[in-house]
């Protein structure tokens, strides 16, 4: 196991505890009557000057509780106010009222920012965790059952690097390679200036970062390139031939315009990825209708939850488009996404934030089952498979 060779016994003990609770709830024959009693949240500091994780825990009158990730990935925690609002809505409601909850969130999302989606999704993940525990099954059983025993992750090293330059990326990239990851993602064009000469220099530096990633991860590794909308169509078309010698896995979010992304896609053999910020099936459909991407990247927190991720993936399957969920998040959000991803026939790869939280493996019990090669093993214990390590939560909790 990556970083935690001694986790096996803890995993068995935690699995037994979860299974006992779930089977007890199911045995009384009244699973449908389980009601939400309260919702709490834990804002955790990851990078003091940048972002944190926002963990949600839902409690029920059956004694079961579930976990979800509502992290917005921005400064502060704007989703907290919505979690508090939704907590009042949920009190006394059935753990199965998810579609009703979804309709309410949809009506609120327009013009209110990502905080609505994150708050909704964190609670929704926790509810599926509870449902699965109540039936004594893993969460993936609620989404069709797993096709993959493990899901592949790439190491996003952007947040763990000191700067988005070759020198800034190198230590974190080598750390990811040493940890056994065989795929890495960099955002080498961030900080793109506006002046033409400065753009050329920054682009050169970005290409140098891509070249370095290929050298570190070798011929058999995969290098993923994040554009963060730093290109227009003209400059996007110009940079493609410069990336082609490095056999990049994809070019992500190069241009903000979907029409221009579709044109870029037609001009290259490099797979074009995008859609990390989309909300709901309607926005996902627009990517597919226009033909903007080869690989769609819905984020479980931002797209509107686990059920929405499954719906979007089904749409993509019909359009012969792969799904690679965005999500540089903590272990709870990663596992919630992975529980859905392992059920998808068109799943490609999942995002993993490498190097930003050295205490990541201390947050959950059992620790995150990440194996060499970036493979996240999907447990068959009931629910999501985790409990919070409250000692770590209290140490890392935001003031």
Image (tube, helix red, strand yellow):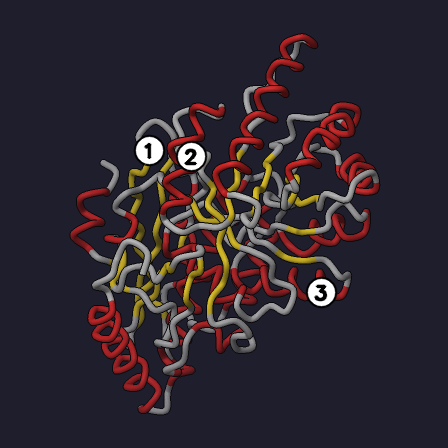
- Asked if the residue at tag 3 contacts the one at tag 1, i.e. Cβ–Cβ closer than 8 Å, the answer is no
Residue 286 place in picture, x, y as percent: 76, 49
Q: Nearest to the eye among marks 2 and 1: give it.
A: 2
Relative to 248, does residue 299 appear above or below in the rendering? below
Residue to which mark 2 is pinned: 159
Q: Position of residue 167 (x, y in %)?
A: 44, 23
Q: Earlier in the sequence, mark 2 or mark 3?
A: 2
Residue assigned mark 3: 317
**Measured Cα–Cα span from mark 1 to mark 3:** 37 Å
Instruction: Label 1: state its secondary structure.
Output: strand
- Work out whether residue 381 or residue 349 is closer to the camera in this orientation and state it: 349
Q: Are marks 2 and 1 in contact (CB under 8 Å)?
A: yes
Quadrant, the N terminus: bottom left
Q: Is residue 221 shown above or below 186?
A: below
Q: Residue at x 48, y 54 (%)?
A: 153
Q: Nearer the viewer, residue 33 or 1?
A: 1
Q: What crowding class fits label 1: few (fewer than 14 Cα within 10 Å), some (14-19), or many (20 or more)?
A: some
The first of marks 2 and 1 along the sequence is 1
Where does label 1 land, which residue? 47
For image coordinates 58% across by 42% down, the residue present is: 224
> Which quadrant of the view contains residue 320?
bottom right
Q: Residues within 10 Å of mark 2 (few under 14, many from 20)?
A: many
Total marks shown come to 3
Q: Nearer the viewer, residue 27 or 85?
A: 27
**Residue at 55 percent of width and 20 percent of height:** 191
* Direction from residue 257 to residue 69 in the image, left or right: left
Badge 2 marks a residue whose secondary structure is loop
**Mark 3: secondary structure:** helix
The quarter holding residue 321 reads: bottom right
């Amino acid at each position: 196991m990556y970083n935690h060779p001694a986790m096996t016994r803890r995993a068995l003990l935690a699995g037994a505890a979860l299974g006992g609770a779930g089977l007890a709830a199911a045995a009384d024959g009244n699973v449908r009557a389980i009601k939400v009693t309260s919702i709490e949240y834990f804002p955790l500091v990851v990078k003091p000057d940048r972002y944190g994780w926002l963990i949600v825990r839902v409690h029920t009158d059956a004694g079961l509780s579930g976990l979800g990730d509502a992290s917005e990935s921005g400064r502060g925690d704007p989703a907290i106010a919505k979690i508090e609002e939704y907590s009042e809505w949920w009190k006394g409601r059935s753990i199965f009222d998810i579609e009703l909850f979804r309709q309410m969130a949809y009506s609120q999302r327009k013009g209110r920012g990502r905080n609505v989606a994150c708050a909704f999704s964190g609670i929704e993940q926790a509810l599926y965790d509870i449902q699965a525990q109540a039936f004594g099954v893993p969460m993936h059983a609620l989404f069709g059952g797993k096709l993959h025993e493990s899901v592949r992750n790439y190491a996003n090293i952007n947040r763990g690097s000191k700067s988005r330059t070759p020198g800034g990326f190198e230590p974190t990239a080598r750390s990811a390679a040493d940890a056994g990851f065989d795929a890495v993602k960099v955002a080498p064009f961030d900080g793109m200036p506006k002046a033409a000469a400065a753009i050329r220099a920054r682009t050169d530096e970005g290409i140098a970062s891509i070249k370095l990633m290929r050298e570190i991860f070798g011929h058999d590794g995969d290098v993923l390139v994040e554009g963060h909308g730093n290109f227009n169509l003209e400059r996007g078309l110009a940079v493609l031939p410069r990336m082609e010698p490095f056999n990049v896995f994809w070019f992500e979010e190069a241009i903000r315009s979907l029409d221009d992304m579709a044109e870029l896609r037609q001009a290259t053999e490099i797979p074009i990825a995008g859609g990390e910020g989309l909300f709901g099936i309607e926005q996902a459909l627009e990517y597919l209708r226009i033909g903007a991407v080869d690989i769609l990247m819905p984020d479980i927190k931002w797209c509107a939850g686990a059920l929405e991720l499954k719906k979007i993936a089904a749409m993509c399957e019909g359009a012969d488009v792969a799904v690679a969920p965005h999500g540089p998040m903590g272990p709870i959000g990663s596992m919630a996404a992975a529980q859905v991803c392992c059920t998808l026939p068109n799943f490609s790869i999942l995002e993993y934030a490498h190097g930003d939280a050295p205490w990541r493996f201390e947050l959950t019990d059992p620790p995150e089952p990440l194996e060499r090669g970036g493979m996240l093993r999907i447990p068959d214990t009931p629910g999501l498979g985790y409990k919070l390590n409250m000692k770590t939560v209290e140490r890392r909790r935001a003031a």
